[in-house]
Amino acid sequence: MKNLCIAILGATGAVGTEMLNALNERGIPCDSLRLLAAPVEAGKKILFRDRELTVEGASENSFQGVDILLVAAANEISERFSPLAVQQGAIVIDNSSAYRLDPKVPLVVPEVNPQDIETHSGIIANPNCSTIIAMVAVNPLYRRHRVRRMTVSTYQAVSGAGIRGLQELERQVAAYLRGEALEHETFQHQIAFNVIPHIESFLENGYTKEEMKMHNEGRKILHDDQLTVTCTCARVPVFRSHSEAIQLMFDEEVDVEEARELLRTAPGVKLMDDPAHNVYPMPVDTSNQDLVYVGRIRRDLADRHMLNLWCCGDQIRKGAAVNAIQITQLVIQKYFA
Amino acid sequence: MKNLCIAILGATGAVGTEMLNALNERGIPCDSLRLLAAPVEAGKKILFRDRELTVEGASENSFQGVDILLVAAANEISERFSPLAVQQGAIVIDNSSAYRLDPKVPLVVPEVNPQDIETHSGIIANPNCSTIIAMVAVNPLYRRHRVRRMTVSTYQAVSGAGIRGLQELERQVAAYLRGEALEHETFQHQIAFNVIPHIESFLENGYTKEEMKMHNEGRKILHDDQLTVTCTCARVPVFRSHSEAIQLMFDEEVDVEEARELLRTAPGVKLMDDPAHNVYPMPVDTSNQDLVYVGRIRRDLADRHMLNLWCCGDQIRKGAAVNAIQITQLVIQKYFA
């Protein structure tokens, strides 16, 4: 294998930090690892394995010699740098939403559509966090019985807004206990002891961008334009793990036991479905982990074509960093092995 | 009007306390007000208007002379005392779930089916909190366009477990900030910074009793055995107000603007639907209030027969105490005016 140079753009953020952890945990060979971030972050030291790395300010010429660029930055940053990195010879794995719906860009969940990476023309997109978690849970059922309609209500963690989101929840809770006013900056409203049915901006049709991602990205990942997806996204005062209540309508009858069996052996899934013993997925048990936990599988009360389930997954790990590193592993196998 | 004697059984709990507030706020005439509770609570003093009342331990003979008994106690307590109170001449308004599905017992949301009180034979049941909130929001649409299917995901406050639920969340948050272990007693698991998809016990069919209440009680309140209801109930770390993501399938096309108009003028509803200005219902804005707030009304992306909406309501007030006091008002008008 050739000496591999991997770079992370946005290496100091919540997702960038988890990308470093996942590169390490998964033993990804990276003889050269470069950490890029906003110029204000340049000079910071970060320990990776036994090496101390220095963060570089990203610029137009940062990508010479980079084989794989992981982008953990906002859309505008990705739009500015990803095409340059591709020109300079890198394969870009982009966690922003800038290119996700571009027909030339594959949108990949490695447990679902790994083969799609082969269609890339420089950029491979990492899907939205809630969408990744739903896809890992739903795909094993979908492969056996086609899904016609999917209704999702999310219970999303504050980590979706990065480190500032985590800090804001903690700060508000502390202010509450001191009897002080709860100030907010990162979220539109107070998030401590609250639920905010608003993630990302609203569109003309009354849905948020976040809700439309479940629809648009879900259909793209499954290659199914006939699939109907309705989603309500809400932020809850939880640190890291997203929860989702999912209702699936299949085109044929599906048995609960069969669904459990399909999920028990599915890649990336941990079946956690023993209500008699109070066992079901919850944010506190599923944070800081790479699997999507699925439980509460039950048949609709009237329609034998429908199942309900509940799933949880760590938003920063499987919902972002780990999925990108799994794509990195596919890219290395395919192009650098 | 005759001199009215009202008694509250469970007067010292979270719901009982709010019943007292609501009796006062709504200016209900109660020349004689008796506060009943477990013997251990007997002797406590509670101020009502300008009177100091003494809590009595409830016993078999507590109900002589009582015209209306409000029950804010567990099922077994209601089952023990409600029939005795009826025998002794009282009309019982019962907040427990003991009699809700009894065909001889009307189950009433005053904004939805006030006329049902006339069918009582001593007991009138107050519905489940999440069901009341959903019914107030859905009924104005249902009256114009029949609903075939209703899918609900709840985000339920800890007040559903009474004062101990409120205290447990506060205690866990304080322990978290001190870096101590989070102990739980009232809920099955840690609730601070978590979501628990489990409210009340599980049934054979994989649903919880709480989820089946939305189905069974919803159909009874609307007098519609054809209505399909699927519900996922989850507890979130919020103090008092329940939130619900509701998807409705109608038997004909329904326009979003028409739905808004129907809700704008509906009794007990406050339309709060201006996403462009970050206006939608949230627990922090809807607690300690009697209305059900409805927003995020939008059409399904594929099916013109379907609408999605989001509603919030205070679980102790409209979800329990206030609904019971509204029933009390109907009973007074009908039988004591």
Image: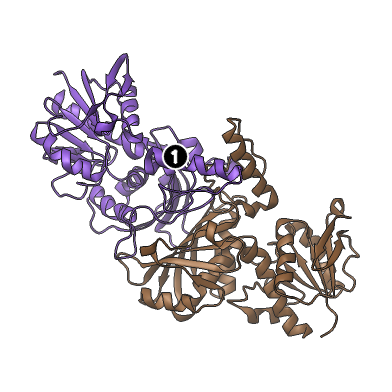
Chain colours: A purple, B brown
Whether A82 is drawn above or below B35: the answer is above
Measured from the top left, where is residue A297 in percent x and y?
Answer: 46, 48
Q: Nearer the viewer, residue A36 or A308?
A: A36
- Please name the amino acid that badge 1 sits on: Leu
Q: Is residue A188 left or right of residue A77?
A: right
Measured from the top left, where is residue A277 in percent x and y?
Answer: 59, 40
Q: Is residue A296 left or right of residue A4?
A: right
Q: Is residue A154 left or right of residue A43?
A: right
x 76%, y 67%: residue? B70
Res. A301 in view: no
Whether B277 is drawn above or below B336: the answer is above
Q: Quadrant of the N terminus of chain B?
A: bottom right
Measured from the top left, where is residue A199 in percent x and y?
Answer: 37, 53
Res. A309 in view: yes
Whether B199 is drawn above or below B335: the answer is above
x 36%, y 43%: residue? A133
Q: Quadrant of the C terminus of chain B?
A: bottom right
Residues packed near mark 1 inside 10 Å, few (<14), some (14 to 19) or many (20 plus): many
x 54%, y 68%: residue? B292
Measured from the top left, where is residue B302 in percent x and y?
Answer: 30, 65
Q: Is residue B154 left or right of residue A324?
A: right
The residue wearing badge 1 is A166
Whether B187 is drawn above or below A146: the answer is above
| Residue that sits furthest to the top in the current view | A50
State the SS at label 1: helix
